[in-house]
Image: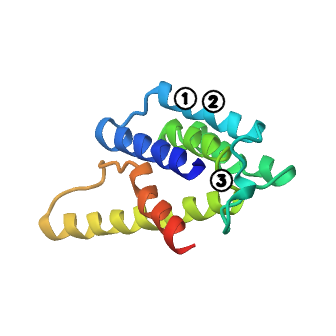
Amino acid sequence: MVQIIYSMFLMQTAWHDLKKRQIPLWIFLIFGILGVFQLCLPVLPMHAMSGSLCQETGMGQLAAFLPGMLLLGITACTQGAVGPGDGLFFIISACYLPMRGLLFLLTAGLIFCSSFGLGMVIWGSWNGISVRRMRLPFLPFLVPAWFWMLFFW
């Protein structure tokens, strides 16, 4: 059940990031509230899930919020070059995934995004098109990483 809710959150945010380059606040609020309930209530325990997507407890759970906080810090330092939606996404994701899952999702998403960006640079140089000012939405690249986690991890 938790994986389905998280998948809906990821798909909603990726869609809005891709189409509008902005994620509505209501998405973060709804899935953030559901995530907090999931953490606090034993009704939806991720402990019962088999495999490596089990929820952590204590300090491990608190550490899962660090990637999102780091991304928000990078947003502040780069004056918005990294969107605040990415940091908020990973903060809310910490309610659903353990630290190990978040780091895998972030790393795989960065690999997919940078590979696509490199392809854009090569394509642009071959066709004489400047891609210097083009921006890539990051969250859509998390979708294949999430499917990789669900089916192969």
> In the picture shown, does residue 102 fall above or below 10?
below
Q: Alpha-carbon distance for marks 3 and 2?
A: 15 Å
Q: Which residue has dot 1 on it?
A: 30
Q: What amino acid is at disc 2?
A: Ile
The residue closer to the viewer here, 90 or 57, is 57
Q: Secondary structure at mark 1?
A: helix
Q: Which residue has dot 3 on it?
A: 97
Q: Alpha-carbon distance for marks 1 and 3?
A: 17 Å
Q: Residue furthest left?
A: 127
- Pointer 2: residues within 10 angstroms few (<14), some, or many (20+)? some
The residue closer to the viewer here, 74 or 17, is 17
The structure residue drawn at horizontal position 83% and vertical position 52%, both measured from the top left corner, is 57
Rendering colour mode: rainbow
Quadrant of the image containing the C terminus:
bottom right
- Pointer 1: residues within 10 angstroms few (<14), some, or many (20+)? few
What mark, if any, has residue 33 been given in the picture? 2
Q: Secondary structure at mark 3?
A: loop
Q: Give left or right: position of 73 versus 28.
A: right
Whether tag 1 and tag 2 are in contact, CB under 8 A, the answer is yes
Q: What amino acid is at disc 3?
A: Leu
Q: How far from the left and from the top, in percent, is residue 129?
A: 17, 58
Q: What amino acid is at disc 1?
A: Ile
The structure residue drawn at horizontal position 13% and vertical position 66%, both measured from the top left corner, is 127
Q: How far from the left and from the top, in percent, is residue 130?
A: 22, 56
The residue closer to the viewer here, 150 or 16, is 150
Q: How far from the left and from the top, in percent, is residue 26?
A: 49, 25
Q: Quadrant of residue 75?
A: top right
The structure residue drawn at horizontal position 20% and vertical position 63%, both measured from the top left corner, is 124
Q: Residue furthest right?
A: 58
Q: Alpha-carbon distance for marks 1 and 2?
A: 5 Å
The residue closer to the viewer here, 13 or 7, is 7
